[in-house]
Amino acid sequence: MDSFFNNQRILEIIWKRKMHFVIIGIVAILLSAVFSSPTFIRPKFKSVARVYPTNIWTLSNESETEQMIEVLNSNDIKFKMFEAFNLADVYEINKEDPKFITYMLDKYSKNVSVSKTEFETAEIKVMDYDPQRASNMCDSIILYYNKKVRSLHKQKDKEMVIITQSALDKKYTELAGVEQQLDSLRTATGIISFNEQVPELTRGYMTALANGRGNAPDTKKIDQLYNSFSKDGAKATLLEARYNRTLNVIDSLTILHDMHVTEYEKDITYSHVVEYPFPADKKSYPVRWLIVLLSTVSAVFLGLLVFLVLDYQKE
């Protein structure tokens, strides 16, 4: 076996069979050039787009670009592309086939790819027999991405609008109940605002006593009101505090509710296109020179093995 692959032996065979190798090389070049022509291999054109994610928030440890790629690769977008460009006919796959979806997804993944670049952009590549269709598919993927993210955001914002509106309705009902209790207490006791009235009431009562008007009608009214404060003051204080707390909660909920209503009503994009796709004027597949080169090298190498075997058998 060592003598079979001996360098000297190989060089001698190459020199002795040099015309054979030339013929093999020429035939390989001609055949590979013919069989890699558009007659046998239908050419494909590539369209490329690069986009940055915008106006989104990350849902896990993944970056915004990685999240963008997840959405771009979602089956929802793929199915929309199947329908929009009638890719079943383009890829020549029978819709009645039981494995239609499997074949379509496999063919799509071979012609459409989404990846992250070193500059954190999402790069969309589409290969197709029609350069215009390849460009249009790139544009449509970006369009469907924006619609998909917008739908996800609107879904969450709508949930928050419903939740905050329900909370607001409950708080307004609670506020009305507290307000009714306060009104009843104020009518019965004359307590308007416990914290504000007590200092003034105490000051007026002390002044009346100091001036020797303890039995005056006005002083008796002050005394009655003072007694009401002593009896129902704590209840009034609790109701006022509860009323104010409820108002504060309503204010916070209103801000949150309005924010989500605004977000729900927005119609914005979620991608910033830094490189727009365009119809290619030169095919990207097949690379004929590479096919010819590999075919020629393979043919010559195979010829060398055959000649080595023949030479070895002679011995």
Image (cartoon, rainbow, N blue to C red):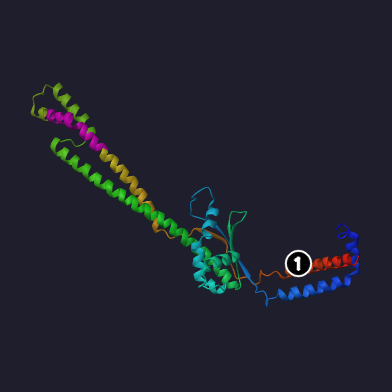
Quadrant of the frame with the N terminus: bottom right
Which range of residues does the magenta coloring cover? 222-241
Asked if the stretch drawn in magenta spans residue 231, the answer is yes
Does the magenta segment cover residue 44?
no
Image side of residue 221 versus residue 62, left or right: left
Q: Position of residue 272 (x, y in %)?
A: 53, 59
Q: Is residue 24 above or below residue 120?
A: below
Coordinates of residue 167 in the picture (x, y in percent): 31, 48
- Residue 279, percent across and down? 60, 71
Residue topped by disc 1: 294
* Left or right: where 42 falls relative to 199: right
Q: Quadrant of the C terminus?
A: bottom right
Give, as a three-letter code, the residue at label 1.
Answer: Leu
Placement of 29 over or under 73, stated as above or below: below
Looking at the image, which is closer to me, 16 or 124?
A: 16
Q: Residue at x 89, y 63 (%)?
A: 11
Q: Nearer the viewer, residue 203 or 78?
A: 78
- Res. 245 in view: yes
Q: Quadrant of residue 7?
A: bottom right
